[in-house]
Amino acid sequence: MNKQNLMSRRQFLKTALATSAAVLPVTSVLASSASAPARVQSEITIITSGWPLTPMPTAEEIEADKARAGYAEALQTWLDENPGVTFQQVEVNIWDQQAIVTAISGGTAPTYVFPTSIGGWTNAGARNAFVQGLMADVGPAIEKYGLIGKLTPGALSGWQPINEIGDAYMSFPIDSGMDVFHYRRDLLNELGIEEPPLDWTWDDLIALAKALTAEGRQGLAAPTWMAEAILSDHGFDILSQVPSPQNGWNWMRDTSDPKWVELLTEYRKLVFEDKAVYSDVSYTTDNFTNAFVNGAVGLMRTNVLGAFGSAAQENSMAAMANRIGKPYEEVIGFRGIPRGDNGYFSNPIYVGGVAIGPDTNDETLDKALGAVDYMFLGAGWDLQKAGQYAATQDLQAVFNYPIPIDGKYTYEGVPGAFEDAWGQRTKDDILYYAGLPKAPDEALYMPVEQNPGPDNQAFEDAWSTINYVADEVDPAAVLKQAQDTWNSQAAGFSSSVDDAAFIDGAKTYYEALDAFWKDASPEFYESTFKPWYDSKVLPALG
Amino acid sequence: MAERTIPGGQTEEAIQAAPVESAPLRLSRRSRIEKWMFIIPAALFQLVWGWFPLVFAFALSFTDARVRGPISFIGLQSYTRMWGDPLLGEAFRVTFIYAAMSIVLTFVIPILVAVLLMEMPPRVMRWMMLLWFLPLSGIASTILWKYMYNPEYGLMQGIVRLLGLPEQRFLNDPNLVLFWLIFPGILLFGPGLIYMAALQGIPSSYYEAAEVEGAGFWRKIWTISLPRLRPVISMMLTFAIIGSLQEFYWPQIMSGGGPGSASRTVVMYLYNLWGNLRFGDSTTVAIFLFAIIMVITVIYRTFYKEDPDA
Amino acid sequence: MALFPKVGRNQPRMRAAWWVLVIFLCGGVALHLFPFFYMIALSVTPAHEALSPTPVIWPKEPTLAAWRLVFELTTRTSMDTAVRDLMSFPFYVYLSNSLFMALMTLLISLPVTSLAAYANSKLQRGPMARWSFLFFIGTLMVPGVVTLIPSFLMTRNFPFPLPSAPLIPGTDDPFPILRIWDTPWAVIIPGVFNAFNFLLFKGFFDTIPDSIIQAARVDGGSEFNIFRRIVFPMSIPVYAVASWLQFGSVWDSYLWPLVVFQTPDRIPTSVAISNLMNRFIQAGSTSAQQAAAQTASMREILEAGLSWNGLMVLGLLQTIPIFIMFIICREYLMRGIRLRGLK
């Protein structure tokens, strides 16, 4: 086939005709043989699209690229311990929702899939997809490989509420990240601005955004959901949702608290009066990163996963530090999600995992996750990292996992540690935020919902309006409209959970929340949570 | 374009040669068989790969359609749910405005440019077409237009300031975002190749005859070029109606449907539903849209007579 | 050369009007050249400058890094694992897959579609013509995503749009099925009837006066001979346009080939390239959650150093064959003009 493009047109047409004549009978033969699934073999074939593991590199590939050697050594060690297992590479785009859902519908999904892309990039969607049977239960592997004991408490608290669904588990964790605000430490020093404390608040953030705003530079880079962020960092996600077991869909939204309007008004002031916000309806995540590494914004909310690219990557923050000519930690600083002025705080740790296609048999599932366990959380990880270091001598490229889920910040065979690549201060700050307590998540208390429910579109529209529309906008009306739209959409859905089970689940959930906040933030508890709990939740649950 | 007779009747002489025109078509037996042989292969493919999956998908709108596991019939639940969805109504409103605006503002351009381009000598035409169809990466134009529309430093804002007009918010303005999404299509005009193909079929004797009559530049376009293009225009308009009512990609990457819901079209909403794995609901929306487009097409085809000789 | 009068073309007023027209058309061409120039400029712009808030017209520090990266990527000569992982085969493998699919589709689709359009335009009358018109274009009225899963399942278990073939009633044997999934035929066969081309052809055939066909019929030719001898030669320009458009659409199609191929060396260029590009152009995330999840998916691409400049080169690479096809088709498109020029 490879010479085809060199042929003349006439030759090509001839070949094409001949091929078509030849291929037709072949396809019908294929068809008759295809009815017996090719995967039922005594040997185990793990089908991968290249993530998180690739098949064994060939000797030639290792020769061409020394960084492969570590990976090959690690994988070979595992394969030797697990005879009869082979990896097969297929071309399935597991990051494209339509492609992967379609593949699952026909039983052609690879062994490894990415849960969040199947669910339309939200955790709720991923859980819904799991409930619909689009992923296999990885529970047996979680137990067999003793995963829960390997995770740090922070990683466990980020992973469990999303991945434990009833008695089953959706994904096997491999890495984790966290939302933070990155800022230019060198700019702060230059301008003589004091660094915000670790437990900074939204008031600090707004003041910092204003202070960093100057000719040619805006204080804060803000995607559409920044308007939501200011609310959810004050507890909006918990406080705007009320159980209502008497309705078909068991939840209602209630945004009547005047606090929200106040916050949105303050945020709009920052955008439209102070002009301190870098934001436009057409921007994507890349625009913000680029603005930040170009010095056009001073403060940006990102996931730390995206922030630890080695200086060898042109667009990374480390590369910017190099261009400025200073060590990374003198240029880049970060703070976690700011606290609300009502005392609310959160630990938005995010744990990414690998899920397994639903047509995988038990044995293959076990081996596939055994390989992941070995390569990411076992001895294979160190072998890979040592190989990578030997080939690149680049500590930043080696230590690109800022919040290892097993808490390991040094690797056997790599001279140096995370802090040598990124600085001690960077590591200490990460550990501070990763160690914050996490509020109970409703997913661990409520019965599993089998039916799809209303999505968040109505509220996303509200944030977009708040963020971009410069004309007179009444935040109260916008919020009210989102709430009403959501509630009227919810009226079209019915829950699979019966009222009694719902009320039981909700009671334990809210009791746990009550206990948590009483202890974790008495200020939030007294000023906001308790009055709300007494007036909205308890009456609804009877 | 409602004109159905051509002023200056003598230009029509050439094609009045065979006056069997309006007689009902009577085909011989052999021709009737041939007619079916022309149609059947296409009809088979259209039936099997076009309609069959479609009807199958449509049936899912009465179920709680899931990708795997048992599916149960839920009757009209999806229909009542989507009918009552305030965001869907809003999406339909946006779609209608977008479609109407884009047809009014951009449909005529390729016709006109094609007619004018035909005036160039072949050598010039060849070069112009070459440059007009230089390969362009879609992403490049996205980035370019995002720059152009930036309310702070974009080129468009520069032009607005230069003209002394009030500053615009471009894509951030919920009232004008649809116009700004269509605007690049106006500015980057080009010839419609299909019109160029059809224009070649017009014998130059028509124009010469019209010239003898004293018809000028615009009059010749109006009385000869456009009427002869009428069937092609009709088909392209059919397609433009269908296509613009299903607009999805451009607003999605330019404004993501915002601000608020000001540029979220029906198909965009349908994709969101699909993305939330609500297959039954998204099919229901597709059926609403299908019904509307079908009705519009039938109405339009009934009133638009494309036969240039009728 | 028909709108300007033959007589008096040299009058100053006519000449002025002529030049106004030339300038108007050149203006249009220039407007098109600008995005093209811009694409080239972006391809030599360093990644950190590419999306900088001040628009880039020509980069401060032009670099050919992206061209080099793409060269290494497509020839698989890179020393970097991350780059090598982005594409599993040398580019010519994908290129020949695409060529085979696109040309095969044209070869089968053009005759099938155009004959149906001809029959609908010239041989059918009355309600029958109207209904078959709607039958042929009706499927355009539904967004593709709706039929994605059933069509996909049909390539697996033709003719059943189901995950597996049903059993023949009363036995334990499934119905026999035809599987075209994971072969080029899964792209070619569903593309045989092309509703958009049907519109193009139908519109064009409608412009041909019935009288010409009637006259030939009186001479006693079969319908196919009339089509072949009289209609087809007149229609070469529209075939050129339709070929180019369909070639382009098969060449660029992404989602469908993405789901019907699984063997890595069978995918077309559009899939190989768009798999990389699409992750960049996803419109901004709508929640922090989504942003976090997308960061994970972008990581491997960024680690390979691929950025906007590389995408421009890839985009160019993807569209060049369509452009070549355009140049070929343009000659046929202009055939009528040349003929008329001879008169």
Image (cartoon, coloured by chain):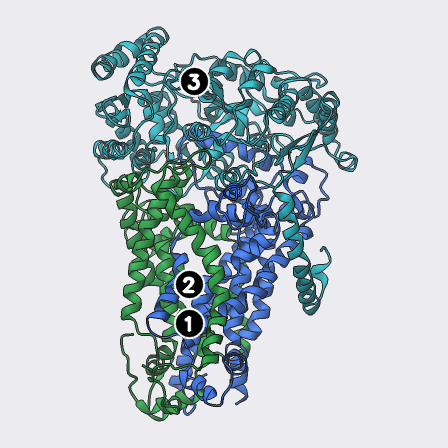
Chain colours: A cyan, B green, C blue
Label 3 SS: loop
Chain for disc number 2: C
Q: Position of residue C168 (x, y in %)?
A: 52, 44
Q: Mark 3 vs mark 2: give the one in front.
A: 2
Three-letter residue code for mark 2: Phe
From where the camera sits, is residue A280 visible?
Answer: no
As rendered, which of A336 and C111 lies closer to the eye? C111
Three-letter residue code for mark 3: Asn
The numbered dot on residue A347 is 3
Which residue in the protein does label 1 denote? C120
Q: Position of residue B166 (x, y in %)?
A: 27, 51
The quarter of the rendered structure image containing the C terminus of chain A is top left
As rendered, which of B45 and A243 lies closer to the eye? B45
Which residue in the protein does label 2 denote? C136
Residue B246 against residue C46 in the figure, above or below: below
Asked where in the image residue B114 lies, by quadrant, the reply is bottom left
Chain for disc number 1: C
The quarter of the rendered structure image containing the N terminus of chain A is bottom right
